[in-house]
Image (cartoon, rainbow, N blue to C red):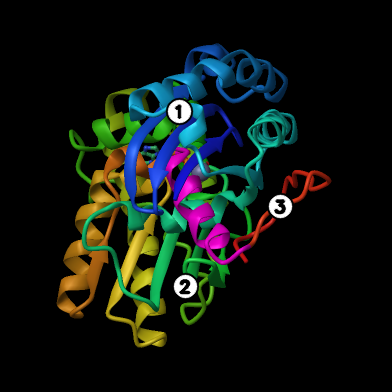
Amino acid sequence: MIILGIETSCDETAASIVVDGSEILSSVVSSQVDVHYKYGGIVPELASRKHIEDIVPIVKEAVTKAGINFKHIDALAVTQGPGLIGSLIVGLSFAKSFAYTLGIPWIGINHLEGHINSVFLESNPPKFPFVSLLASGGHTGIYYVKYHTDIELMGQTRDDAAGEAFDKVSKVLGLGYPGGIEIDRLAKKGDPAKIVFPRTYLDKSDFDFSFSGIKTAVNRYIQTHGDEYKDQIPDIIAGFQESVVDVLSYKVLNAAMEKRCDQISIVGGVAANSRLRERVIKDAETKGIKVHIPSIDLCGDNAAMIAATGYHYLKNGKASDISDDVYSKMTAS
Ligand code: KG4
Ligand code: ZN
């Protein structure tokens, strides 16, 4: 089954052609960073307008790169939520009219399920059931994955998402937006043990997170150290990153042990973080747990993961209806 995936939930316009939920023929992602950069964050109205400009050329590019034409497409999968309403509407409206014109089925996909299914686009994917840590700019949670479309939430952040903490700390230190990549790069020049920030485990036996305290702790450090902090930026960042990574690694491995799973995955934009990847793999090894992490391109928002998820619904006969609408908030399953 050849599926065209479409993703417009946030600040990336993406389209992809995926065969049978696992083979990527093309994956095109157009980032809007240039549009939002000068505002230090995403401006929803500008995001929707940019999606409108980009959606048609991006879909055309994905189809051309895949070496197919429109009549080869069997079905469409599109992000239905959660995300920015105006941005989601662009993708969903496009998908509805495109599917209607071609006379093919379409399915609305939960963006978080999309991230969780991104590991199935890599070779040697995990076997069910497994535990997944999803850490992105909008969400951070731990899930028990019984099947592609049967996912149970074990715990999630009570305030900021992990990626949001990276972005806010980056902003306060004047390192720009989005912050994750820059923090990852600069942290390599710092000493993570020099400035130690608090770790918020909440209840150590559950799987909820809180990242607003660490952001406040970094803010307080800056305020109490005058201009002196400017020479310590790599150490501040390395200390901050280590605190976030410690908590994420601890909780996902504990969740795997509670569910007696010997496989975990880490997905979402923050899964691109080099220290998180290194730490989880090292910690998991001591417990005999195998870690699955998608390649960097599949960690951030993309449409291949939406097409891959769509396949598992469509092959079981599920499809969306012309009256289906977008939703801004919801966790996976
Ligand atoms: O999954 P994603 O592309 O979009 C959402 O669904 O939110 O995640 C974006 C988030 C941003 O907060 C960004 O700063 C973070 O992922 N991110 C990183 C890295 N690359 C992206 N965070 C830490 N280290 C990175 N290398
Ligand atoms: Zn995402």
Q: Is residue 224 visible?
A: no
Any atom of ligand 1 within 8 Å of the CB at mark 1?
Answer: yes
Question: What secondary structure do most residues of the magenta stretch adopt?
Answer: helix
Q: Which residue is mark 1?
A: 178
Tell me which numbered mark, 3 or 1, is placed earlier along the sequence: 1
Between 70 and 251, the residue placed more toward the observer is: 70
Report the number of numbered marks: 3
> Image quadrant of residue 102?
top right
Q: Which residues are magenta?
A: 301-317
- Tell me the residue that label 2 is attached to: 147
* Mark positioned earlier in the residue sequence (1 or 2): 2
Indicate the position of residue 179 as horizontal and vertical percent values.
42, 31
Query: Could you say where residue 68 lies in the image, as x and y percent from the top left?
Result: 39, 29
Q: Nearer the viewer, mark 1 or mark 2?
A: 2
Q: CA distance from mark 3 to mark 2?
A: 20 Å
Q: Is mark 3 within 8 Å of ligand 2?
A: no
Give the amino acid type for the residue marked by disc 2 in the picture: Tyr
Q: Give the residue displayed 61% in from the left and 21% down from the top.
A: 51
Reply yes or no: does residue 311 show up in magenta.
Answer: yes
Dot 2 alpha-carbon crowd within 10 angstroms: few under 14, some 14 to 19, many 20 or more:
some
| Residue displayed at 61% across by 51% down | 109
Residue pointed to by mark 3: 320
Q: Is residue 137 left or right of residue 21?
A: right
Viewport quadrant of the C terminus: bottom right
280 up-or-down from 43: above or below? below
What label does residue 87 carry, if any? none
Q: Secondary structure at mark 3?
A: loop
